[in-house]
Amino acid sequence: MKIAIGIPARYDSTRFPGKPLAELAGKPMIAHVIARAKAANIGDVYVATDDDRIARVAREHGAKVCMTRADHSSGSERLAEAMRDIDCDVVVNVQGDEPLIDPEAIKAVAEPFRHDHKLSMATLAHPIQSDAGFHDPNVVKVVCDAKGQALYFSRAAIPFPRSEGGNPLQHVGLYAYRKAFLLIYPELTACETEQAESLEQLRVLHHGYSIAVNIGDFNCVGVDTPEDLIRAEKIIVGSNREG
């Protein structure tokens, strides 16, 4: 099985313009993402972008670059264009704002494809760590079936704790796709649940495709705002001191 890691990165972020190039511990943030993707050592690393500045930095830090259109509505759609002519079976989508992504998580999200040759898509989850997180709409929850495949994703508290148990899971926004599925993903129409929850993975379930969920100790910290960047820098600097 041949794997490629794709990092979709755009400059024009609504909440944080220029985010991939923001300086983090002495390097552009996208450089940290590339380094962690390369550390997974499961396949070539590609940055998919429409911005020449991001492309230049990506090449400087050892990634291959696929230039894309600027009008994509999601990272998945951008990767679908970028990976069309790349020789691979599975594409791992590592977001360009995940400078702290664990290389082991990147490996883990690709693992289900080794055991299920019909699988369309995979993602990660970990046990909810607090009651506050369980009820936080910014924390996405997932419920799985007996085979470890997603039944539903929601911002609501699911499964509802009517009684003891339930083992709620927090979804981690790291995805892998069989390339054949990724290429048809942009053609899937949006659905009501996707729009209501603002969760694009619900489109996949709505159209009858499976999403495997690998459960483990995966707790990724993304950067959505300048405040998140400060928090990420403290984590990186602290880790370097300990090392």
Image (cartoon, rainbow, N blue to C red):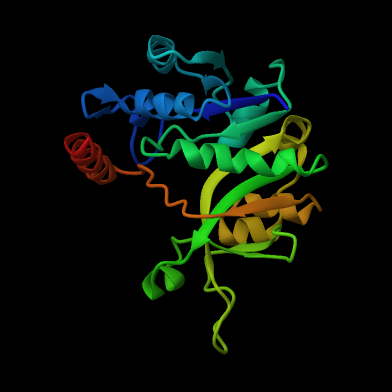
Position of 166 relative to 171 (above/below): below
- Outermost residue toward the left in this view: 241
The answer to whether residue 90 shows anywhere in this view is yes
Q: Residue at x 71, y 22 (%)?
A: 88
Q: Residue at x 45, y 71 (%)?
A: 134
x, y percent for residue 171: 53, 56
- Outermost residue toward the bottom in this view: 163
The answer to whether residue 9 shows anywhere in this view is no
Quadrant assignment for the C terminus: top left
Name the one closer to the observer, 42 or 194: 42
Q: Residue at x 55, y 15 (%)?
A: 67
Q: Quadrant of residue 23?
A: top left
x, y percent for residue 162: 57, 88
| In the image: residue 195, left or right of residue 13 | right
Q: Residue at x 52, y 55 (%)?
A: 216
| In the image: residue 18, left or right of residue 181 | left
x, y percent for residue 25: 22, 29
| In the image: residue 88, left or right of residue 227 | right
Instruction: Count the numbered circles shown.
Output: 0
Q: Quadrant of residue 1?
A: top right
x, y percent for residue 85: 71, 15
Position of 93 relative to 28 (above/below): below
